[in-house]
Image: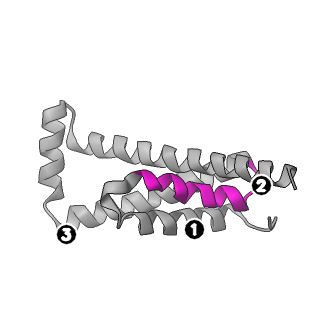
Amino acid sequence: MVSHYTLLSGTLVAFLLGIAFQFFPNYWQLVVLGGVVPGFVLRSWSRAFTAGFIGILLSWVVYVAYLWLAFPASQVISTLGDIVGIPGPVLVGLALLVGSLFGGLGAVVGIALQRMIREYQ
């Protein structure tokens, strides 16, 4: 593995993969893979988690902003929030938090796999 990758490059990779996985709407769980890749290139657990978390968070923010502006997503989210019993923006915030945690935990899995592979070589 290359050691000169920074937090910024890991975040950028997670962001780009997060945007790419937005095109698979039925498979949003693939966002974990968006975090695994920064975990392969970074060496620190905390940096890998941060890169995966922030990269996926930014990609989901871009996607939600696009949906908010291009479609009547605000009405749908408000209706969903009414059904659940919480405000729509809080529901969006919780979804962003969950997606970001998946990205961060994917990065932790990536760094664990990287270390296992390096140990057995």
Mark 1 or mark 3: name the one nearer the start of the chain. Answer: 1
Q: Which residue is mark 2?
A: 43
Viewer-nearest of discs 3 and 2? 2
Label 3 neighbour load within 10 Å: few <14, some 14-19, many 20+: few
Look at the image and say whether residue 42 sits in the magenta stretch: yes
Q: Position of residue 103 (x, y in %)?
A: 52, 51
Distance from disc 2 to disc 1, alpha carbons, whole Å, reads: 16 Å
SS for tag 1?
helix
- Residue at 28% x, 41% y is 91
Kindly identify the residue that appears in the image at 42 percent across and 42 percent down: 98
Where, quadrant-wise, is the C terminus in this rendering?
Answer: bottom right
Give me the disc on residue 70.
3
- Relative to 91, is 51 on the left or the right? right
Q: Which residues are drawn in magenta? A: 29-44
Q: CA distance from mark 1 to mark 3?
A: 25 Å
Q: Quadrant of residue 94?
A: top left
Instruction: Classify residue 100 as left or right of residue 66.
Output: right
The amino acid beneath tag 1 is Leu
Which mark is drawn over residue 12? 1
Quarter of the image holding residue 88? top left
Q: Measuring 16% from the left and 65% from the top, which residue is drawn there?
A: 71
| Secondary structure that dominates the magenta span | helix
The disc labelled 3 sits on which kind of residue? Answer: Ala
Circle 1: is it few (<14), some (14-19), or many (20+) Cα within 10 Å? Answer: many
Q: Nearer the viewer, residue 50 or 112?
A: 112
Which amino acid, by three-letter code, is at mark 2?
Arg
Q: Earlier in the sequence, mark 2 or mark 1?
A: 1
Question: Dot 2 lies on which element?
Answer: loop
Residue 74 percent location from the top left of the image: 17, 54
Are circles 2 and 1 on residues that touch, CB within 8 Å? no
